[in-house]
Image (cartoon, rainbow, N blue to C red):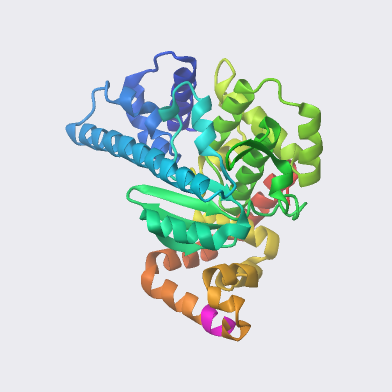
Amino acid sequence: MNTAAKILLTAIKKKLEGKPCDPQSLPQALSLAKKHSVLNLVAEDALKAEIPDALRAKLLSYCAEYLRQQETLDYAGKLVFDKLEELKIPYMPLKGYYMKKLYPAPLMRSCCDLDVWFDPSREKEVKAALGELGFTMKSAGENHMFHTYGAASLEMHYSLGKIPACPDYYADVFSRLVHVGGSLYNFTDEDFYVFLIAHLYKHFKSGGTGIRSVLDIYVYNEKKPDLDRDYLAGEFAALGLVSFEEKLRALAYRWFGGEEISDEPDPLADYILGSGVYGTVQNATVNGAAKHGKGGYFLRRAFPDVSTMKKMFPVLRRCMLFLPFCYFWRLLKAAFTKPKAVKSSLTSFKGADEAAIAKAHKLFGELGIE
């Protein structure tokens, strides 16, 4: 573990405990903190250090933008929830919306977007309602529609995704929910944790996940000490995530619950520290190549499955004859509108050598995941 990571993890641990951290060391860890979306936790303390005026200005600008973003997310959430209640459309906020409430202070847990599950049979109504509220739809994928509202991002989930070991686990979401009141539903505490781990797993396998995800595991387990561990063991067994959850939880307690953060080599910690909050393109390519081979993964990236294409191009729901044209248009659009992303992807394929793929195989094997 490098110096910046140790400084950052130690500072976060102090913040959770309500203790002061060392401001003078924090400037060394600010870049890593931003990469992992935990800069909000240490920015105020870093301003107490002796830092260049240019860095101070950047931190102040970040703090102002962060507060604006969180306020906009809260406002956008109220708009969406009120409209869903008005239309009597069952819904459930996900992930960060509830995790924020478990931290010592809500602003300690950053949220880059608002995730909401809704009754998938009401998709057309939800899409129309969001347009009326002033949300701009940017894209639609296999699991959700992506909208923006000023500085806020909104992901409206008609699906909670599939886990390879048990693809139908979330096929009937309603059966796992508790009715809170009106149109609002929630998971039980146990099922919220299952989804937290399942969602983390998807990020972990695609491109990696970061410090914030490990911190969420620690905070949730600390705030929910009476979780039914027997129930969780059965659910994680069904999902093939027993070892994955155990090792991530153990890491969370080594980082944030122990006396001192260890310098001992740890492949799992290194993978997470090198990933950033949403992972990296390089990790995604290596991980994909480890499972499908480089050629197979390239084809999967270039030509998504039909269900995903139907979400991207609704015309395919009426006529599949347009599928070849939609694939061509998707590739052409990416080349002209996202040239940097295309270049990054192609570069990552070149960097996915046999040693990197073997390393990914070994780590995933130790975690017991596909």
Quarter assignment of residue 269: top right
Residue 326 in the magenta stretch? The answer is: yes
Please tell me whether residue 120 is drawn above or below residue 97 in the rendered image: below
**Could you say which is closer to the camera, residue 98 or residue 236?**
98
**With 151 as the anchor, is 175 left or right in this view?**
right
- On the question of residue 278 being in view, the answer is no
Please tell me whether residue 246 is drawn above or below residue 281 in the rendered image: above
Assign the magenta stretch its main secondary structure: helix
Residue at the spot 56% in from the left edge and 56% down from the top edge: 284
Measured as percent of width and height from the top left, residue 7 is found at 43, 26
Residue 352 in the magenta stretch? The answer is: no
Residue at the spot 35% in from the left edge and 41% down from the top edge: 72
**Could you say which is closer to the camera, residue 297 or residue 103?**
103
Quarter assignment of residue 206: bottom right
Q: Which residues are magenta?
A: 323-327
Measured as percent of width and height from the top left, residue 63 is found at 29, 33
**Could you say which is closer to the camera, residue 258 or residue 222?**
222
Please tell me whether residue 233 is drawn above or below residue 259 in the rendered image: below
**With 21 as the anchor, is 362 left or right in this view?**
right
Residue at the spot 64% in from the left edge and 23% down from the top edge: 224
